[in-house]
């Protein structure tokens, strides 16, 4: 009995001791990561309004080219020109009608009835106004005669224009060659500044305007046609100095084709 009691006490003590033993804490779940709060979006300044693109005009199409409205006078002589012995730098006759000169549509004779001045305001015969009256005939009543030496005539077109061609007649009743023929364009009525030489056959610079590269030519009813290549200007001036038959300068008509 005593042994039973001692055994009971031992078991009771053991149970009591185990009940007082510290319990290990239950494992805890790992702490949750703190939620990442997105930073407030930085308000970007509004971009300044951009101007609407400037519309550049379309490239202008090439202008339509048509023959200039040139009306020729009645021929006064035919055949091979004579009495031209000793004339140097002379171009050969074309031997057939000159082909039409093409220029932008709308090109007209700007010189018709415009004011005319000249190195001699009172010609020997004729009046300077006859230079632009539309009469291209070679009758004596249609000819302006200026004195010997350097002479010029000038036309005021009234405004600056694009000029495509000059056509002029000195004298075509008989075959002649006029010397030192020069055509110039300028916006300066005194022809001191902004002077552009369109044609010159003054190959020895006897007029003092520069050495020309053009050729001498025989006067005919077709007149002398000079390609002005669209040069711009208001005033046109034509020089000459004698001819192969006498020391005088003559003019019948000057036409200036442009827009």
Image (cartoon, rainbow, N blue to C red):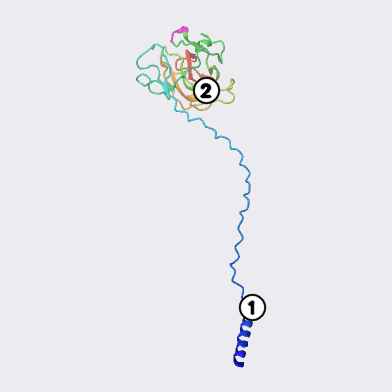
Q: Nearer the viewer, residue 11 or 159?
A: 11
Asked if the magenta segment contains residue 176, the reply would be no
Residue to which mark 2 is pinned: 184
The secondary structure that dominates the magenta segment is loop
- The residue at 60%/65% (across/down) is 31
Residue 82 as seen in the image, left or right of residue 24 = left
Residue to which mark 1 is pinned: 22
Q: Nearer the viewer, residue 33 or 62?
A: 33
Quarter of the rendering containing residue 94: top left
Indicate which label's residue lies in the foreground, 2 or 1: 1
Q: Residues within 10 Å of mark 2 (few under 14, many from 20)?
A: many
Work out whether 252 lies above or below 187: above
Residue 107's x, y, as percent?
46, 19
> Callout 1: helix, strand or loop?
loop
Residue 69 as seen in the image, left or right of residue 188 = left
> Callout 2: helix, strand or loop?
strand
For residue 36, the mark is none
Work out whether 2 lies above or below 54: below
- The residue at 41%/16% (across/down) is 222
Residue 57's x, y, as percent?
51, 30
Q: Disc 2, disc 1: CB below 8 Å?
A: no
Quarter of the rendering containing residue 97: top left
Q: Residues within 10 Å of mark 1 (few under 14, many from 20)?
A: few
Query: If you read the primary sequence from the N terminus, does the residue marked by circle 2 or circle 1 appear first?
Result: 1
Q: Which quadrant is home to the N terminus?
A: bottom right
- The residue at 52%/15% (across/down) is 148
Q: Give me the C-alpha separation between circle 2 and circle 1.
A: 125 Å
Asked if the magenta segment contains residue 139, the reply would be yes
Residue 92's x, y, as percent?
38, 23
Extent of the magenta region: 137-141
């Amino acid at each position: 009995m005593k042994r039973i009691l001692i055994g009971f006490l031992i078991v009771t003590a053991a149970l009591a001791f185990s009940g007082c033993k510290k319990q290990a804490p239950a494992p805890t779940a790992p702490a949750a990561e703190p939620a990442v709060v997105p930073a407030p979006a930085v308000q970007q300044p509004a971009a300044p309004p951009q101007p609407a693109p400037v519309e550049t005009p379309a490239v202008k199409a090439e202008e339509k080219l048509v023959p200039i409205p040139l009306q020729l006078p009645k021929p006064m002589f035919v055949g091979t020109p004579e009495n031209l012995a000793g004339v140097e730098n002379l171009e050969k006759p074309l031997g057939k009608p000159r082909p039409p000169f093409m220029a932008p549509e709308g090109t007209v004779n700007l010189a018709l009835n415009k004011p005319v001045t000249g190195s001699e305001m009172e010609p020997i015969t004729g009046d300077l106004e006859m230079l632009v009256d539309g009469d291209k005939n070679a009758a004596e009543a249609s000819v302006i005669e200026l004195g010997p030496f350097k002479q010029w005539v000038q036309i005021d077109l009234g405004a600056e224009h694009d000029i495509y061609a000059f056509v002029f007649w000195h004298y075509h009743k008989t075959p002649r060659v006029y010397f030192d023929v020069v055509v110039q364009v300028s916006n300066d009525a005194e022809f001191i500044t902004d002077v552009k030489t369109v044609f010159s056959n003054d190959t020895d610079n006897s007029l003092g305007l520069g050495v020309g590269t053009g050729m001498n030519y025989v006067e005919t009813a077709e007149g002398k046609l000079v390609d002005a290549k669209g040069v711009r200007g208001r005033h046109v001036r034509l020089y000459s100095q004698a001819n192969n038959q006498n020391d005088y300068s003559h003019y019948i008509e000057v036409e200036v084709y442009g827009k």
